[in-house]
Amino acid sequence: MKLVLAPMEGLTDPIMRDVLTHVGSFDWCVTEFIRVTDSVLPDHIYHSYCPELLNDGKTAAGTPVHVQFLGNNPTMLAANAVRAVELGAPAIDMNFGCPAKTVNRHRGGSVLLDEPETVYQLVKAVRDAVPAEIPVSAKMRLGYMDRNFTLENAHAIEDAGAAWVTVHARTKADGYTPPAFWDQLQPIRHALSINVIANGEIWNNQDARQCLLESGCEDLMIGRAAVTTPDVTQCIRQNKDEAILQWSDLITLQIRFLNGSYKKEMNMVGRYKQWLGMMSKHYPEAKLLWDEVKRLKQVDEIIAKLNHFQNIMPTV
Ligand SMILES: Cc1cc2nc3c(=O)[nH]c(=O)nc-3n(C[C@H](O)[C@H](O)[C@H](O)COP(=O)(O)O)c2cc1C
């Protein structure tokens, strides 16, 4: 079974990818989307979205990082894909799932699912431009406002030469409201000969089993659950419902995260609190920690607090 870390803008940035691939068990990750309009982006933009390009396209743990693009200009998408590959990207992914209003207003992301022919042209332009050994994939939702073109889009992606397609099992109109319609992936899987990776609302091992069963897919992409419960991939691989990592392990991970700033201007305290807030949904210890750190403003203060917590906690 392949397990993929989902692209999540503002969440699975390089620091989070470093932390999650350090502890989790992912076959690959995908960058946050890189928006392409009318130019080839300068190298520093690539290195900012994907500093892993300087490490053979892999996180420090050795997990490959695929570069994701969003846009509607075939020539520019192709030219940027070529540049990303020259810089070391091991694979290119294309975003047809983003629901953001500003993105959709500029004909990017999920709105293109109403235009299967455009989806085909964009994937084909990129596929034709990058070397044959570099996989090109796409990520789609079931549709934009409805599911009228689900299969057309899936076929467009396959016919354009994509190596696989990842499907977030909801339309843009469904947003992020549960459930995800895993059973709706069955017809896609039957219609295509390329691999279909299932995505959406997989929060734990039980969800993963249920998704595999209902979708018939063999591979999964995990998004928010990987951030909320960093051992979710280990649980899925070992078919275990109980936690594998102790809270003390997770504190070590949080310290790694806070030490990981790769850009001076990064708001690491804000980012950390966002993550702790997400973990609070699952770990009672995170809730307690939240009360201790919520007023802290400096990374060093938080690290000191984490070290203190770790020292007073029994390690198993
Ligand atoms: C904060 C956030 C940002 C996201 N950014 C992207 C993105 O840049 N590219 C993309 O293809 N999907 C993006 N997604 C969608 C996720 O990759 C994934 O499809 C979605 O979260 C459903 O999976 P999950 O239920 O496992 O989280 C984003 C989702 C979230 C919550």
Image (cartoon, grey):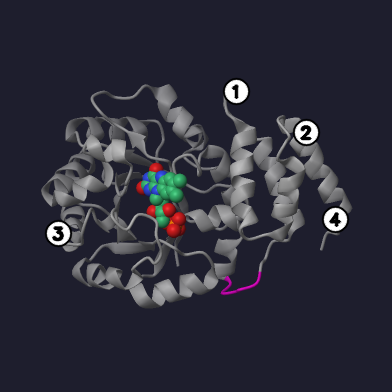
Residue type marked 4: Met
- Point out the frontmost of discs 3 and 2: 2
Q: CA distance from mark 4 to mark 2?
A: 19 Å
As drawn, the residue found furthest toward the right would be 312
Name the residue at 20% across, 53% down: 157
Q: Is residue 184 magenta?
A: no
Q: CA distance from mark 2 to mark 1?
A: 17 Å
Secondary structure mostly taken by the magenta-highlighted segment of the chain: loop
Q: Are marks 2 and 1 in contact (CB under 8 Å)?
A: no
Between residues 273 and 225, which one lies in front from this camera angle? 273
Residue at which label 3 appears: 152
Q: Is mark 3 within 8 Å of ligand 1?
A: no
In the rendered image, which quarter contains the C terminus? bottom right
Between residues 167 and 298, which one lies in front from this camera angle? 298
Describe the element under mark 2 as helix, strand or loop: helix
Residue at which label 1 appears: 264
Q: CA distance from mark 4 to mark 3?
A: 55 Å
Magenta-highlighted residues: 238-242
Residue at which label 4 appears: 313
Q: CA distance from mark 3 to mark 2?
A: 53 Å
- Point out the frontmost of discs 2 and 1: 2
Between residues 32 and 125, which one lies in front from this camera angle? 32
Describe the element under mark 4 as helix, strand or loop: loop
Tag of residue 301:
2
